[in-house]
Image (cartoon, rainbow, N blue to C red):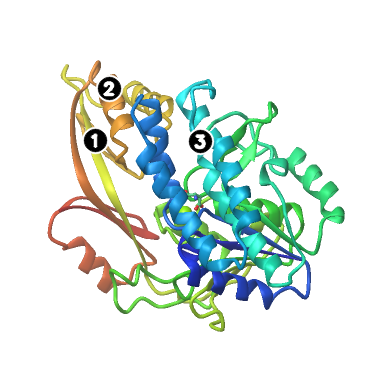
Amino acid sequence: MKVFKFGGASLKDVNAIRNVASIIKQNTKENLWVVLSAMGSTTDALEKIIALSQAGKNFDNELSHLKEYHFNITRQLFNNTTTIDQAIHSLFNQLTPTASIAGEYDCIYDQVIGLGELVSSTIVCHFLQQGGLDAEWVDARNLILTDSTFREGQVQWGETEKKIKSVYPHLKKLVITQGFIAHNEKRETVSLGREGSDFSAAILGYCLHAESVTIWKDVPGVMSADPKRIADAVVFEELPYKETAEMTYYGASVIHPKTVKPLAMRNIPLLVKSFINPSLPGTKIHDCHVPNLPPLIVHKEDQCLISCKVTDYTFINEDHLGTIFQALHQNGMHVNVMQNSAISFSFCVDYREHRVLKLIELLSKKFEVFYNTGLLLITVKNYSPQTFNEYRNLKGVILEQSSRAALQVLVKG
Ligand code: ASP
Ligand code: MG
C-alpha cells in the first residue's frame, strides 16, 4: 500500500481539486491512503476566528467568508450539492467556537482548528465517489493517539500502530483521511502542530509499513535552495534520510521536520513530487549515499537574536547557561544558533512575539537583555570555498558561525 499527502496549495480551488482527484485516480490499482490538509489558507482563517472568539469579539464575517469559500467550491464540483452541503454545514455546526467549548486556549484551539481538514477531506471524498471511485472517508482522530499536549500532540506510537493495524483490513482500498489531527485518551482533538499533515502521512506510512509515502508539492522535488530566492537551485533525484532531516532542522520548509524519522526507522521511501507536473520524477528520500552533494542553502525568516549580558563583573558560566536554557525550555522555545563571549550569551530563536516577550521578561531578572527582530538566518550546508566566502561577506551579517559541515549567518534587513 502507498500513502499520498496533499497540502493546502494543491486543494486551493476547483481546478486544483480536480487535478488532485485525477492524480488519485491514476494510482488506485493498489491500496492507497490519502492524507489531506485544509484547503488553501483555511487554517489561517480558523486561527483568526478562534482568536476573535477567545477575545470575545464578533467573528461572523470571517466565518461566513470561510463557509462561502467552501460552498463556492462545492457548487462548481458537484452535480447535486444537497448531500455534500449538508455534511459541511453539520461539520461547521459542530466545530464553530462557542461558549460551550470549555478549557484553556490551546485546548479550545485544537477542538476547532481541524475543521479545515474535516471539510476538505469530506469534499474530496464525495467528489471521488461522484467520479465513480469507491473511496472511504476515515476520521484521523480515530487513528492517531497522542498525549494531551494541545497544538503539538506527542504521538503514542504503540497504541496508534495497534489501532491502525486493526482497522486497516476492514477499510476499502482507497481511504481518504485528514492530516494534522489526532486525539488523546479523553477523545478530545489534539493537533500535531502547524503544517503537521506531512507528519500525519509519515505516521500512517510507518504504522502500515507502506511501500512509500508521497508528498505532493508545488515544486518539482527537494531543491538545493528555495527557487524563489536562488534561480539556479537544482532538484535532487535522491537524498539520504539524514541529509533531509538536517535540512528541515535548519528551516527548509519543503517537508515538516518530524516527517523523516518514522520513515527512516522502517526504511520507507519518502517521495516528494510535483502535483503541477506529476510525470516529473521528483525526489526520492531513502537509505542512500549521494556523493558530492552541492551546497544546500536554507533561508529561515523572522528570526530574533537575544543577547543576555551579565551585569556583575562575572563571566558567563554554566549557572547562567542553565538559567537561560531553563527559561527557553519553560517557554517551549528552540534555539536555532547560539554563541557566547566573556560576558554575554547570544542565541537566535523564531520570533513568536508572545513567547519572546515572556522569555525576555524572565531573563531580565538576571541579565541585561538586548534583542533584535526581523532577521534572516541563512544556513549553507556542504559549503564550497566559493559559497563560504559569498555568504560570510553578505551585507548586514550580525552573527556568523561555521563548522566543517555548515556555515550559518544571521543577516539584518
Ligand atoms: N492545515 C494545517 C496547517 O496549515 C496542517 C497542514 O497543512 O499541514 O498548518
Ligand atoms: Mg497548510
* Mark 3 residue type: Thr
Disc 3/disc 2 C-alpha distance (Å): 38 Å
Q: Counting residues from the N terminus, which is met first, the one under dot 2 or under dot 1?
A: 1
Q: Badge 2 is on which residue?
A: 363
Q: Residues within 10 Å of mark 3 (few under 14, many from 20)?
A: some
Mark 3 and ligand 1: say if the CB distance to the nearest ligand atom is below 8 Å: no
Q: Quadrant of the N terminus?
A: bottom right
Q: Counting residues from the N terminus, which is met first, the one under dot 3 or under dot 2?
A: 3
Mark 1 and ligand 1: say if the CB distance to the nearest ligand atom is below 8 Å: no
Where on the picture, by quarter, is residue 121? bottom right
Tell me the mark number nearer the camera, choosing from 3 and 2: 3
Task: State the image coordinates of residue 221 (x, y, percent, origin top left).
Answer: 49, 73
Q: Are marks 2 and 1 in contact (CB under 8 Å)?
A: yes
Q: Is residue 225 left or right of residue 121?
A: left
Q: Is residue 387 above or below residue 399?
A: below
Q: Residue at x 52, y 48 (%)?
A: 116
Q: Badge 1 is on which residue?
A: 306
Q: Badge 3 is on which residue?
A: 96
Please, what secondary structure does the residue beneath circle 1 have? strand
Tell me the mark number nearer the camera, choosing from 3 and 1: 3
Q: Residue at x 40, y 54 (%)?
A: 250
Q: Is residue 333 left or right of residue 398?
A: right
* Mark 2 residue type: Leu
Give the label on residue 140, or none.
none
Task: State the image coordinates of residue 169 (x, y, percent, origin top left).
Answer: 87, 55
Disc 3/disc 1 C-alpha distance (Å): 38 Å
Where on the picture, by quarter, is residue 157? top right
Q: Is residue 18 left or right of residue 352?
A: right
Q: Is residue 361 above or below residue 371?
A: above
Task: State the image coordinates of residue 21 (x, y, percent, origin top left).
Answer: 61, 71
